[in-house]
């Protein structure tokens, strides 16, 4: 290969580029990113950067000198708009074509929007560093904040805003925060944690509209008719894979880029990170992981397999690992935590808010969750990998 293109300039894209060089690729390496900023990390955006504990530059993934050593042709501030896998070329901004011998898709996610409200000032989504800085500037004015969506992102934003001393309401259609990530039992503890810190938690509620005055949001309307006063509303209702530029390419798409077990989507085309969808042998089904650790690990595998002989390609079968930091609590997850799993606390106790819980389906451990218990949690990782009983 003489020319490899990486589309996506965040954690997965930068890791792929770094791996290609480490594996001995000496040809032209182009990285395309739709932001003008150099690659930065996203997990701190809803926490340290939004809180003001970190200056924005601290989220940058590599020093400029380290990026230069990768000898990248950086195409920052440009958006890939289409790809021709037969001619092996991508198009930037609908005009410039760049040929490639190998392509790694690492375009990540785009935030979902509500069908209303986004034309009002004070209504935000949070995906980019610029999103975070814009939101932080508003939070410094001491507004009343409504966070719509209580997944990882929404819960973290609510915790950060409350940590700044703001009046915060957290709304979700599910029964508890993090219901899809940790199940109802632990989700109820998350709800209690937010309430203990003074957040108004409204579960099982749909947002049906927003009210504005002079072009700015003033209230969020719920399906029970209640109106939540809001100077700022943050919409955190999930994300969708950024695959719109691949629609007419012939590259298989579904919930993301559909890859084989080696992260290959088409001849010479691999995918990594939040956008990649592949069959996981431990699950026995296709999955897509929106986790920071997965972005790095999958990018390494995709880059290695792009350079490797097909007979030597590695199957990607990681043990999922994710975490969230809210207030003084760190929740870490190994494996999967299905909402219908049997949950058993095996280390510590819930009352002290320091414990490990195992998630079991059909008598087998499929996940382990640690609540302020990072060291104890590691002891149970092997149960998941081996599908053993407790």
Image (tube, rainbow, N blue to C red):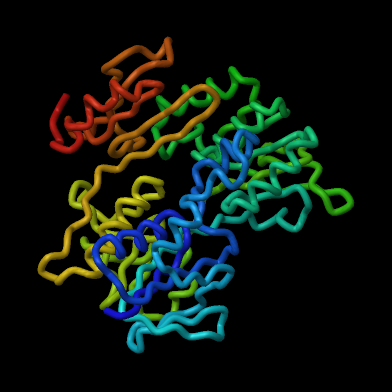
Report the residue that reaches farthest toward the right: 214
Name, please, the residue furthest toward the left: 311
Examine the image and state in which quarter residue 267 appears: bottom left
Viewer-proximal residue among 28 and 8: 28
Residue at left 51%, top 48%? 42
Q: Is residue 268 above or below residue 185?
A: below
Q: Position of residue 37 (x, y in %)?
A: 58, 59
Nearest to the observer: residue 325 or residue 210: 325
**Image quarter hosting the N terminus:** bottom left
- Tell me the residue at 47%/79% (across/down): 82
Q: Quadrant of the C terminus?
A: top left
Q: For this view, does 337 lie left or right of residue 262?
A: right
- 230 left or right of 48? right
- Residue 230 locus on image (x, y percent): 76, 38
Q: Residue at x 66, y 32 (%)?
A: 161
Residue 366 left/right relative to 82: left
Looking at the picture, does residue 298 appear above or below residue 157? below
Expressed as whole percent of the image width and height from the top left, the position of residue 347 reads 28, 16
Expressed as whole percent of the image width and height from the top left, the position of residue 10 reads 47, 57
| Quarter location, residue 364 | top left
Q: How many marks?
A: 0
């Amino acid at each position: 290969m003489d020319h490899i293109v990486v589309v996506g300039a965040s954690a997965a894209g930068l890791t792929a580029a770094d791996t290609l060089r480490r594996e001995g690729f000496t040809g032209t390496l182009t990285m395309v990113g739709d932001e003008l900023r150099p690659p930065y990390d996203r997990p701190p955006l809803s926490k340290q950067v939004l809180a003001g504990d970190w200056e924005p530059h601290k989220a940058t993934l590599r020093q400029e000198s380290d990026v230069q050593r990768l000898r990248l042709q950086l195409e920052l501030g440009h958006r890939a708009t289409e790809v021709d896998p037969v001619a092996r070329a991508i198009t930037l901004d609908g005009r410039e074509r760049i040929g490639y011998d190998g392509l790694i898709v690492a375009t990540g996610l785009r935030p979902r929007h509500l069908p209303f409200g986004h034309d009002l000032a004070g209504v935000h989504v949070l995906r980019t560093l610029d999103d975070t800085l814009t939101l932080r500037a508003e939070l410094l004015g001491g507004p009343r904040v409504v966070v719509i969506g209580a997944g990882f992102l929404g819960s973290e934003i609510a915790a950060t805003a409350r940590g700044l001393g703001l009046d915060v309401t957290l709304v979700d259609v599910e029964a508890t925060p993090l219901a899809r990530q940790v199940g109802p039992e632990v989700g109820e503890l998350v709800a209690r944690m937010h309430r203990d810190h003074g957040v108004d938690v409204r579960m099982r509620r749909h947002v049906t509209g927003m009210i504005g005055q002079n072009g700015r949001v003033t209230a969020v309307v719920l399906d029970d008719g209640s109106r939540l006063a809001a100077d700022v509303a943050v919409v955190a209702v999930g994300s969708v894979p950024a695959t719109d530029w691949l629609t007419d390419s012939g590259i298989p798409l579904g919930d993301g880029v559909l890859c084989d077990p080696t992260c290959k989507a088409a001849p010479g085309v691999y995918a990594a990170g939040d956008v990649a969808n592949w069959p996981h042998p431990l699950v026995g089904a296709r999955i897509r992981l929106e986790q920071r650790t997965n972005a790095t690990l999958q990018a390494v595998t995709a880059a290695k397999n792009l350079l490797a002989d097909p007979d030597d390609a590695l199957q990607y079968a990681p043990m999922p690992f994710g975490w969230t930091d809210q207030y003084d609590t760190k929740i870490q997850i190994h494996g999967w935590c299905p909402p219908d799993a049997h949950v058993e606390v095996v280390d510590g106790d819930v009352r002290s808010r320091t414990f490990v819980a195992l998630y079991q389906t059909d008598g087998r451990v499929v996940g382990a969750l640690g609540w302020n218990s990072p060291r104890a949690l590691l002891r149970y990782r092997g149960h998941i990998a081996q599908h053993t009983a407790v």
